[in-house]
Image (cartoon, rainbow, N blue to C red):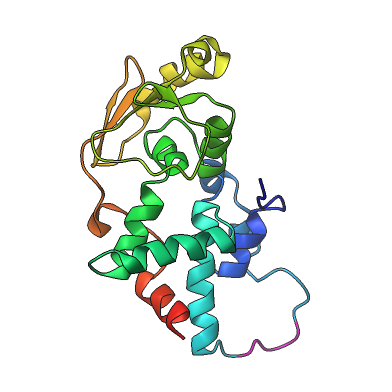
Amino acid sequence: MARYTAAVCRLCRRSGDKLMLKGDKCITKCTFDKRSKPPGPQLGRRRRLSDRGAQLREKQKARWTYGILERQFRRLFGQAERQPGITADNLLVLLERRLDNITFRLGFADSRSQARQLVQHGHITVNGHRVDIPSHLVNEGDTIGWRAGSTKTEYYKQLLATIKGKTVAPWLNLDKQSLVGRVTSLPTPGDVEVKFEGKTIVEYYSR
């Protein structure tokens, strides 16, 4: 499975914004705070960003935030476009419904990349069945928990001790004793704080 393997701090510098790709490390020890300029040689005065460039930047921000490669992101956008309603809102909901993102939102991982690894290694279940596909779309009413064998790991034991200090998204419910979460409702754009403009992404793909 293809994935981005280079330094993620470079992505924040390229986007010009802190995307919180490393979870808590982005708060305590962040490269962007020290070097906010884009990576690569600095060729004097920076050129003004064109409208097309601004649209591309917003699209890349969304991709990098959720850890998705271009082909998969384009396919997800097409799915959002075919659904009734506002395409930008549909896209955000689809991104939030990914299993790796749900795992992150429930506090099972400190970052989406860590959550993706948990899913790929088969630690996470959906409605009692193991699912190892990070892009699996979770539906309203689904329960997300841990495989029985995974509850014996040291990571799970540490998570039980630290989960009480974590906040859960308002559209999710988590039993912090058993570490079983439930999707009480699908998210709305108002429930999700993101650092990209969905409308600008729609404009990018509309050209």
Q: Is residue 168 magenta?
A: no
Quadrant in which residue 203 is drawn: bottom left
Question: Can the viewer see residue 193?
Answer: no
Give the x, y percent position of residue 75.
48, 62
Q: Which of 111/164 is in front?
A: 111
Q: Compared to 78, does 136 lie above or below?
A: above
Give the x, y percent position of residue 10.
66, 60
Point 24% across, 46% down: residue: 186
Give the x, y percent position of residue 97.
36, 46
Quadrant in which residue 103 is drawn: top left
Point 39% across, 62% down: residue: 79
Q: Residue furthest top?
A: 152
Q: Which of 125/7 is in front?
A: 125
Q: Is residue 44 magenta?
A: yes
State left or right for residue 115 relative to residue 172: right
Quadrant in which residue 102 is drawn: top left
Q: Which of 25/71 is in front?
A: 71
Where's the N terminus, which quadrant? top right
Q: Which residues are magenta?
A: 43-47
State left or right for residue 65 relative to residue 96: right
Give the x, y percent position of residue 86.
26, 69
Q: Residue furthest right?
A: 41
State left or right for residue 4 relative to residue 170: right
Point 39% across, 23% down: residue: 145
Q: Compared to 195, does 57 lie above or below?
A: below
- State how many labels appear: 0
Helix, strand or loop for the magenta stretch, by majority: loop
State left or right for residue 89 relative to residue 104: left
Question: Can the viewer see residue 51?
Answer: yes
